[in-house]
Image (cartoon, rainbow, N blue to C red):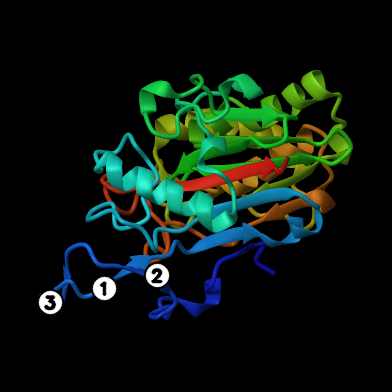
Amino acid sequence: MEPFAPVVRPEDGGRHEGRERNEGTATAGTENGEKGRPMPVPVPLLADLRPWRRFAGLEAGFSTRLGGSSGAPWHSLNTGLHVGDDPDAVIRNRRSIAGRIGWPFEAWTSVSQVHGNRVYRVTAAVRGRGRERQEDAAAEADALITDVPGLLLVMYYADCVPVYFYDPEHEAVGLAHAGWKGIALDVVGETVRAMEAAFGSRPDRLYAAIGPSIGPCCYEVDEPVLQRLLPLAESLRKFGGSGGEALTVPARPGRAGANLKEFARRLMMKAGILPSRIEISRWCTGCRTDLFFSHRREGGRTGRMAAWLGRRS
């Protein structure tokens, strides 16, 4: 069963017309050329991490591209301030998501992502940093950890892998951003080790999840990237298990499809997380540009989805 549950299912294909609901009204501007007629207010289409609903007070989810205020090519629920979109539209989208999940926007906390493996511990002192200005981000990092309730950790994606961690014993959470560079640098394992050091988390007691991201069907990489990934793939061979997928899929000469989700899963296992505690999304952002932004499929000019994780106060 797909662990990330938006309104539509992966098997629905493109048949989600009418699922992007509009609620509320506004009278500013016009609709259908009639001045003063109420305009529909978009409602964001979001996917929560369904298996983690059982953890009281925990909020974990991922946005789609539907139900926002941004115009093309960022239409419509773009959450990235760094992609050329109107900042006011991005902030409206972010506020809309926060409101939809019942969190104050002041809790929305972000860093500048740099495709590395630095892990940043978020404290109450930086609560809300980066929510309205990229320059105000709390740090440069590609993973966030905290044990402070009332902080909503948020990172941004358009094909890269969202990686979630939860330690119910120490009430700590972690969220990572893993593209191929982050995978090669083991940002996944670095996050687990940072939670061990900071909170005393035991890897075998952590829960983890891998969110919607590009699959090997849509993510063909060239020889320089393969030179970084193939040695890692060899070192992760023993963590495949009976149900493991291939880490790379041969394509044209000198090229292969990279399975970033499977790399992330095996890095979790290498770090000590039990496979029975790992959830993996089946959504491919490259296949489903009707629902998600895809940097690869849309030529780099597109929006960003948001992943969030936090414990309510």
Which residue has dot 1 on it? Answer: 38
Q: Callout 3: few (<14), some (14-19), or many (20+) C-alpha neighbours within 10 Å?
A: few
Please give left or right for residue 44 compared with residue 101 in the image. Answer: left
Q: Is residue 167 left or right of residue 216?
A: right
Q: Residue at x 83, y 53 (%)?
A: 276
Identify the disc placed on residue 24: 2
> Type of residue at label 2?
Gly
- Alpha-carbon span between mark 1 and mark 2: 9 Å
Q: Nearer the viewer, residue 126 or 184?
A: 126
* Residue 274 rendering spot, x and y as whole percentages: 84, 44
- Label 3 vs 2, first from the N-terminus: 2
The answer to which of 278 and 174 lies nearer the viewer is 174
Asked if residue 122 can be seen in this view, the reply is no
Q: Report how far apart the C-alphas of labels 3 and 2 lie in the structure.
A: 18 Å
Figure quadrant of the N terminus: bottom right
Q: Earlier in the sequence, mark 1 or mark 2?
A: 2
Q: Is residue 185 visible?
A: yes
Discs 1, 2 touching: Cβ within 8 Å: no
Residue 75 image-quadrant placement: bottom left
In the image, is residue 71 above or below residue 163?
Answer: below
> Callout 2: 10 Å neighbours few (<14), some, many (20+)?
few
Mark 3, residue position: 34
The amino acid marked with disc number 3 is: Glu
